[in-house]
Every structure is written in structure tokens, then in C-alpha cells.
Image (tube, rainbow, N blue to C red):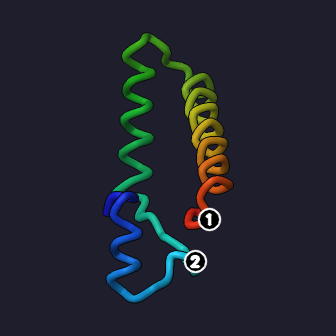
Amino acid sequence: MHAGKLPGELSRRGLSSARKVWVAVDPEDEVVPGRLEARLRVLSTGLGDDEAIDALIESAREEVERVTEAVAHQNPFWT
């Protein structure tokens, strides 16, 4: 399910938007393909060192975490 559909799904199940919920992401569906796609993009630039690739992926992960935290502070639904 796309994250944008989550509020509707919670409402459909009778859950308040003020209620805190946990959302599990299936790594096979979301995380692993994204990591593989990122690795292929880096390799296509000519980088081949696993440490360099992992460092770039970690940098992108940290940026996503910063954005996610900023959104969470603006929208209580995300906390």
C-alpha cells in the first residue's frame, strides 16, 4: 500500500487519526528492491567499491530520516 493511502485505510478500520499505530514494511516488497536499485545506479556511475556504495546508501538513508522527522513534527499523524 502506498503511504498516502494509509489515512483512508485507518479510517476505514475505524481508527482515529490521533491514535498511534505501527506500520510494518515487508523488506521483500519495499526495502530490498530499493537498495538494489540504488546499488545499480551507483554502479552505473563507475563506482564499484562496496564501502563507497554503502556510504552513499547510508547518506541517503540519513537524509530520509531527517525529512521523516521533520514531517513527524509538522503532522502528529506520522508520530
| Image spot of residue 24 (x, y percent) | 48, 70
Q: Does residue 46 sit above or below 6 in this rendering?
A: above
Residue shown at the point (33%, 64%) measured from the top left:
5
Label 2 amino acid?
Answer: Ala
Outermost bottom residue: 14
* Mark 1 lies on residue: 76
Label 1 amino acid?
Answer: Pro
Q: How would you rate the neighbour count of disc 1 (Cα within 10 Å): few for under 14, some for 14-19, many for 20 or more?
A: few
Q: Does residue 46 sit above or below 71 in this rendering?
A: above
Q: Which of these two is toward me, 24 or 38? A: 24
Per the image, label 1 sits on a secondary structure element best described as: helix
| Image spot of residue 40 (x, y percent) | 37, 27
Residue shown at the point (44%, 11%) measured from the top left:
46
Q: In which quarter of the image is the C terminus?
A: bottom right
Residue 28 visible in the current orientation: no
Quarter of the image where one finds residue 56: top right
Does label 2 or label 1 sit earlier along the sequence? 2
3D distance between C-alphas at marks 2 and 1: 7 Å
Quarter of the image where one finds residue 39: top left
Residue shown at the point (57%, 33%) measured from the top left:
60
| Mark 2 vs 1: CB contact within 8 A | yes
Quarter of the image where one finds residue 52: top right
Residue shown at the point (34%, 72%) measured from the top left:
8
Residue 73 vs residue 36: left or right?
A: right
| Image spot of residue 59 (x, y percent) | 63, 31
* Mark 2 lies on residue: 18
